Amino acid sequence: MSDATKILLDESEMPTQWYNIIPDLPEPPPPPLHPGTKQPVGPDDLAPLFPMALIMQEVSTDSYIDIPAEVLDVYRLWRPSPLYRARRLEKALDTPARIYYKYEGVSPAGSHKPNTAIPQAYYNAQEGVRKLTTETGAGQWGSALAFASALFGLECEVWQVAASFEQKPYRKSMMETWGATVHSSPSPLTAAGRAILEQDPDSPGSLGIAISEAVEAAVQDPTIRYALGSVLNHVLLHQTIIGEETIRQFAKIDETPDVIVACTGGGSNFSGLTFSFLREKMAGKINPTIRAVEPAACPSFTKGVYAYDFGDTAGMTPLMKMHTLGHDFVPDPIHAGGLRYHGMSPLLSHIYELGLIEAIAIGQTECFESALTFARNEGIIPAPEPTHAIAAAIREAEACKESGEEKVILTAVCGHGHFDLASYDKFLAGEITDYEYPEEKVAAALERLPQI
């Protein structure tokens, strides 16, 4: 066991390949289906949305995919990212557990999202795309894509979920600083947005609605493509650089995690941290418990059904088999805006169905309490999204205190909370409440699932 508090890799030790978990799974995930024919979609079906390089990654059966040199050059602005031992937190909790966290808030955009924004912008630029459209919840993904688009000479147009657009105005400023155009979603600029506003002029929006708007804008112009910040296979693939680095960092200190916890909304952060460890677990080399943590107000893993559904509210995307609360379910406006998505990554949903990972849901009050404990001991103010993982790590550490077990706990702090201080203000003022899981709303949305 090492005495190091900060475990670093040299630039020369940074991984040069992404890891694709699909070939190592006991069985392949169900394919996406065309919403009209109900047949598996092919590359041509996805071509209006994505460049062919990303489509090929989406369906790849190669275990490793080389990271382009131009992408590695940008990654080196902040990668390899640090792995920390949370010694002060351990002391405050009086736990025998050893807690480690991989910190992705060191990127220029302040989160893990540039890990995929950079290659997505690169591949689109390589194929002559002029402009990218996207959605964003809390603004982390929109910020990352605006940053990446600026580096590769692309225009960027972002639809930000209305609840977060109001809560986090400086995310909009950040995106605009990098040259992006930002709209509150639902907006009057698209047919999808107008339809929602007619039903509810004060709609808080959702990621599903914002996706519909961004997709609608992209498919109308052959020089525009759409970029997604989570959910799809190629996005999860790009994030595996997190876990590939973390494997190397643990090897440096001769440690192995017993429990790995990470937050899940669409699944990119969780997959990025855990897939490399899951590979080692499936190979029989290690045996950690791997646990996804989602918000109690939007619990697609723990309360959703595993079924084919649209990835967006308007029903413009292919049908994907995933854990879903229903494509037109609009979650309550919790402060972890990046986790307010009705569905879970199809690949992660498949892995969950195979029994390879666990999932729990935690309310936002406990998450903010855990965030304060973390910040007051480790110094980093986390974004609301990773506070779910921090809360789960603290639960595990406290259980170790009761049992006396010296478990090694690993989590990911996938972004800082510098643009989320309005949320902390509300919590400190006693104005944050836990939203109950809206069973009636979800039941109504599930009644409208596509019939396959």
Image: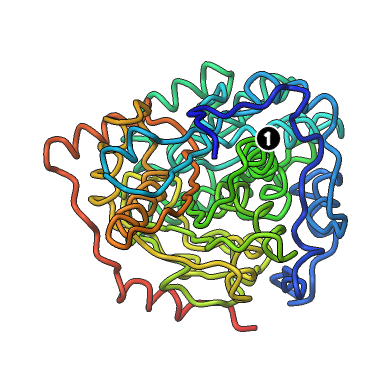
Percent x, y for residue 16?
Answer: 81, 34
Percent x, y for residue 49?
Answer: 74, 48
* SS assignment at label 1: strand
Task: Identify the image quadrant of the C terminus.
Answer: bottom right
Q: Residue furthest top?
A: 177
Q: Residue furthest left?
A: 430
Residue located at (28% from left, 44% from top): 370
Residue located at (31% from left, 49% from top): 334
Q: Amino acid at mark 1?
A: Leu
Residue located at (86% from left, 30% from top): 126
Task: Identify the image quadrant of the N terminus.
Answer: top right
Q: Is residue 345 left or right of residue 385?
A: right
Q: In front: 129, or 245?
A: 245
Local crowd size for mark 1, using a 10 Å CA cut-off: few (<14), some (14–19), many (≥20): many
Query: Mark 1 — residue?
Result: 132
Relative to 61, is 155 above or below? above
Work out whether residue 116 can be spotted. no
Percent x, y for residue 397?
Answer: 35, 52
Where, by quadrant of the figure, is residue 384 drawn?
top left
Where, by quadrant of the figure, is residue 338 drawn?
top left
Work out whether residue 347 can be spotted. yes
Relative to 23, is 55 above or below? above
Question: How many marks are shown on the rendered structure?
Answer: 1
Percent x, y for residue 89?
Answer: 33, 37
Q: In front: 374, or 226?
A: 374
